[in-house]
Image (cartoon, grey):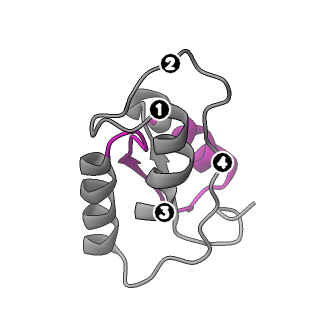
Amino acid sequence: MLARRAADTILACRNAVKGEAAAAQMTAAAPGATVSVVRLDLASLDSVRAAAAEILAGHQRLDPLINNAGLMWPAYGTTAEGFELQFGTNHLGYFAL
């Protein structure tokens, strides 16, 4: 809906191939829409920094930010920085972004 209303839409995706496929579907449904894909892995603060820098380089502002990702009861693991995976992804990654 945002793309149909002429919003510059950024898909921040861990999997760039799936992100590009989603962007293609969006532009097919909303001809003339501006949809870009930025690689973002919320479980890596380095990835969050890189994605934020890429977004800032191409846009003067970001509004609104719609977060629609997260982990629920994953097997125990840690982020690249050593935080528990669910906490690091669902809280620290979003906060850093």
Q: Amino acid at mark 4?
A: Asn
* 4 and 1 marks in contact (CB < 8 Å): no
Q: Amino acid at mark 2?
A: Tyr
The crowding category of the residue bearing disc 3, from other C-alpha atoms within 10 Å (few below 14, some 14 to 19, many at least 20), is: few
Q: Amino acid at mark 1?
A: Leu
Task: State the residue at coordinates (62%, 55%).
Answer: 67
**What's the CA distance linking mark 1 and mark 2?**
7 Å
**What's the CA distance linking mark 4 and mark 3?**
14 Å
Q: Position of residue 97 (x, y in %)?
A: 42, 62
**What's the CA distance linking mark 3 and mark 1?**
15 Å
Q: Is residue 71 left or right of residue 36?
A: right
**What's the CA distance linking mark 4 and mark 1?**
17 Å
Which labelled disc corresponds to residue 85? Answer: 1
Q: Which residue is mark 4?
A: 68
Return the residue nearer the eye: 20 or 80.
Answer: 80
Q: Position of residue 40 (x, y in %)?
A: 38, 45
Q: Amino acid at mark 3?
A: Phe
Tell me the element at label 4. Answer: loop
Q: The magenta stretch spans which residues?
A: 20-44
**Which numbered disc flags the more N-terminal residue, 3 or 1?**
1
* 1 and 2 marks in contact (CB < 8 Å): yes
Task: State the residue at coordinates (45%, 34%).
Answer: 84
Query: Residue most toward the bottom?
Result: 60
Q: Specify whether residue 97 is in view.
A: no
Q: Nearer the viewer, mark 2 or mark 3?
A: 2
**Which numbered disc flags the more N-terminal residue, 4 or 1?**
4
Tell me the element at label 1. Answer: helix
Return the residue nearer the eye: 47 or 63.
Answer: 47
